[in-house]
Each structure stands twice: as structure tokens, then as C-alpha cells.
Amino acid sequence: MIKKTYIIFLLLLSQIAYSQDGIPVYSDYLSDNLYLLHPSMAGAASYNQIRLTARGQWFGQEDAPKLQTLNFNARVGERSGIGAIFFNDKNGYHSQTGGYITYAHHIKFSRSDADLNQLSFGISFGLIQSRLDETNFDPSDFDPIIAGIVQSSSYFNMDAGMSYNFLNFSGHFTVKNLIFQNRKLNDEGFESNNQRKYLISAAYAIGKFGATWTYEPSFLFQFTERTGEQAIDINFKAYRQMDFGKLWGAVSYRRSFDGSEYLNGTEVDSQKLQYITPIIGVNFKRFMFAYTASFLTGKVKFDNGAFHQITLGYEFLGGRQEPYDCNCPAIN
């Protein structure tokens, strides 16, 4: 019983650490959804974009984590981009709903209209409501800070970042939750007002412009300021050009740099959070579909099932008549 308690505690702690303040950082960005992470990518692509995602974890488990997002971004004029994000995130008794609006500014350094050499800056303003449902807590287990109601708190925050897209290379830096805010759902002595997180990512597409096959290695590094948590994604993506659009697939490996201890019989062991995430997708004319499955690895698991996600997308009203003369999947 003690071993099971430690296992459940470890997994819940890991999920809360990576999924509560604003939109959780999963592998959505590999499904042609970079704007969800980086506000500087609003309006950066050749076409305006709509993306809808739905994610479910631990199917069959009560109150398992679920996340839905809807976002839109578009180019406005030569140098501006706008965007909006709406999301709903639930994890056990905790849930959050919110939205962001984004403005991005794009600076071109290209010598011709066919070359991609663009520096972008973006800022998102978000309003988030966090909730803690205490209605199902055991009333006989008295605790003075538990009111037995649905507590809620709304707060404002900001994300800001920059992107550089040059031919087949793309790099991004974003700071999430710039403003120190206390959600006031728990005692202020136990809840930090610093939810700031730093994201650094980069990708390089291997293959000539117009080639049948393109290969794209990439990475994403996360750093949480208050707790010092760090994690990295190592990714590889392949594209196959087709008459109707393109087929593509990716595999991502996520590993935290920080381990959690758990009791294994009479011994205390340590394990780091690790995911393996395969993704398959298709672009059919202006439509996009992707399926993602994440598998937790290691000895300690809450459930053997995968975490599943569906992404739907649509592109419209492009600001460019012709694509850039580069193998740049995030832009073309």
C-alpha cells in the first residue's frame, strides 16, 4: 500500500508541475502549431491558420487530465501578425480556463521576396480562471482551509518572445507568465506567485526546396524559474510530399533533468519523468490532421495507457502568392 501511495504521489506531482499555470507544454508544437507556444509566430506563416486540439490522458481513470485548445493567427499587412488562443484544462480537482490575444511584429532582412530571413517579436495578453473543486472532499476529514465549495480565482498574465526564421533554420525563445501572480486558491504561504517559464526551441529542415522528402531534427528546452525544473525534448520529423499535400510523421523524446524519489519495497529509488511521443499527420490541400500518442516510460507508472491527442487545422487567405524558396515547413 505504501508503494502504491508513493507511485500515485509521484505521478500526480509530475503532472501538476508541468500542467498548471497557463497552457501546459506538451508536443502540440510538432503538429504545425508553433504559435501555441511562441507568440512571435503569430502571422509568421505564409497562410493564416486555425488549429483545434483535444487531449486526454489515462483513459478509464476518473478525473484524468484533459486539455482542449482553439487558436487562430493571421498576417496583417506587411509586418504585423495577430492571434488568439482559448483553452480549457482539467487535472483532477484542479481546472483552468482562459484566453490570450497576441500581437507580433515581423522584420524582414531578405534581399528578395523569395528568400526567407525574418526576425519576429510577439507578446500575448492572457486572462485565466483557475478553479479548485472541493465539493467531493470528505467532510468528516476536517481541515480549516477546505470550504467544501468550488473555489475560483481569475488573474492576468503575459507571454513574450522572439523567433528567427532563416531559410531552413528556425529558432525561438519565449518567456511564459511574465507577471508574478498569486492564484489565491491556496494559502499564500504555500503558493508561489512566480509561475515564470522559459522556452528555447530550434529546428533545421534537411532537404532542398521542392524535394520529395524532408527531414527535420529539432529540440525544445524548458526551464521553470521558481522550482528550477528543467526538461528537454529531442525530436525528429519527416515529410513526404504528395500530389494532394504531404504526409509526415515525428517522434519526440522528453526527459526531465530532475528526479523524484519513491519507495520501492524497502529501498528508496529515483526516477526522472520521461515520455516517448510518436506523431502522424497529413496535410490535404488547406486542411491538416494529426494524431499524437505519448507513452510514459520507466518503472513507475500510474497507467500503462498512452496519452492521446487529435489536432485539426485549416489554412486560408495567404499573404503570399508563392512560397519562399526554402525548405521551411513552419513558414511555407
Image (cartoon, helix red, strand yellow):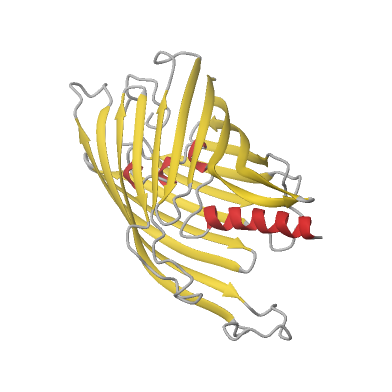
Q: Quadrant of residue 279?
A: top right
User: Where does the C terminus fall, quadrant-wise?
Assistant: top left
Residue 315 in the figure: left or right of residue 121: right
Residue 112 in the figure: left or right of residue 94: left
Depth check: give the residue in front, 279 or 251.
251
Depth check: give the residue in front, 140 or 200.
140
Depth check: give the residue in front, 273 or 62.
273
User: Where does the N terminus fall, quadrant-wise?
Assistant: bottom right
Q: Let me know if residue 78 appears in the view.
A: yes
Q: Farthest residue toward the right? A: 1
Q: Is residue 275 above or below residue 248?
A: below
Q: Is residue 99 above or below residue 83?
A: below
* Residue visible at 26% across and 21% down in the picture: 114
Q: Let me know if residue 244 appears in the view.
A: no
Q: Is residue 292 above or below residue 85?
A: above
* Residue visible at 62% across and 45% down in the picture: 309
In x, y percent, where is residue 304?
A: 76, 45
